[in-house]
Amino acid sequence: MKQTFLFLAIFFLNSFAQKIHCDSDSDCFYLPKKAKGKSPALIYLSCTGATEKDMREMKKVGDSLGWVLATCHKAKKRRDFWLNDKDITKTYEKLIKNYPVDSSRVFLYGFSAMGVQALLTLFLHPEKFRGVISVCAHSQALPFARWQRLKDKLIYLISREKDWNLSENRYLHKVFQENGLRDTLVITPGEHNIGDIKELLKAAVWLNKNSR
């Protein structure tokens, strides 16, 4: 019986590997073949609601690092932060339940308003999330930070030389440093815009290295 269960579990995981699966909420999940045992995971947020197209573009991150990936479709810009948070945590629960994820190494990614949302969700649920990649966000979520609960969290901030939120990112970096968080601030050329897959991979590599 035990051998049969093990065989079915291996068959199930192999059948899901390297395929994108989207559920009835339009949340998408990706289990790379390189994933070994319990793997880190990244939940991707988009200002317009993350889709399967976003997942196809970010698959390289999962394939490179062996990370399990997820997208949250309902969370988006110009939507109530608390509704977004509810849907992100729902995506998290499905991810943890259905995939071989290291629950101590689940990260969030967001650009602009969704970078703020990612920070807010980390601050509200530090028991669920280890860190955030925040691109061109601002400091609106800071009042919800409870520093004693965030000591082991990781935050990778990205801004641009002409980003209208550049000063906000410098301020966030200063506050995180003052409160003992492990964070970094990367400032690249350009204006307020989302980065490419190389930028996302570089950020994920930093989180991967510093969360071990």
Image (tube, grey):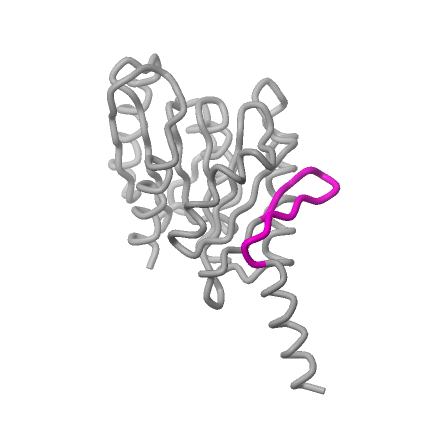
- Residue 28 counted in the magenta span: yes
Q: Which residue is at the front of the view, 48 or 113?
A: 48
Residue under the image location 43 percent in, 52 percent down: 63
For the C terminus, give its image quadrant.
bottom left
Q: Position of residue 52 (x, y in %)?
A: 60, 37
The image position of residue 69, as x and y in percent, is 52, 48
- The residue sitting at the right extreme is 24
> From what the image shows, is residue 164 above or below residue 136?
above
Which quadrant does the N terminus fall into? bottom right
92 in the magenta segment: no
Query: 198 or 172, which is in the foreground?
Result: 198
Q: Which residues are magenta?
A: 17-29
Instruction: Please give left or right for residue 198 compared with residue 82 in the image.
Output: left
When the figure is inspected, residue 114 is found, relative to residue 11, above or below; the finding is above
Q: Position of residue 94 (x, y in %)?
A: 65, 51
Q: Which residue appears at 50% of the width and 51% of the height?
A: 127
In the figure, 5 relative to 168: above or below? below
In the displayed structure image, the side of residue 26 where residue 160 appears, left or right: left
Q: Residue at x 28, y 13 (%)?
A: 162
Q: Nearer the viewer, residue 63 or 72?
A: 63
Please state the total of marks drawn on the protein image: 0
Image spot of residue 96 (x, y percent) = 59, 56
* Residue shown at 41% from the left, 46% from the top: 61
Left or right: 1 in relation to 158: right
Magenta region's main secondary structure? Answer: loop
Question: Based on the displayed image, in which of its 4 quarters is residue 97 positioned?
Answer: bottom right
In which quarter of the view is residue 2 placed? bottom right
As rendered, which of 185 and 139 lies closer to the eye?
Answer: 185
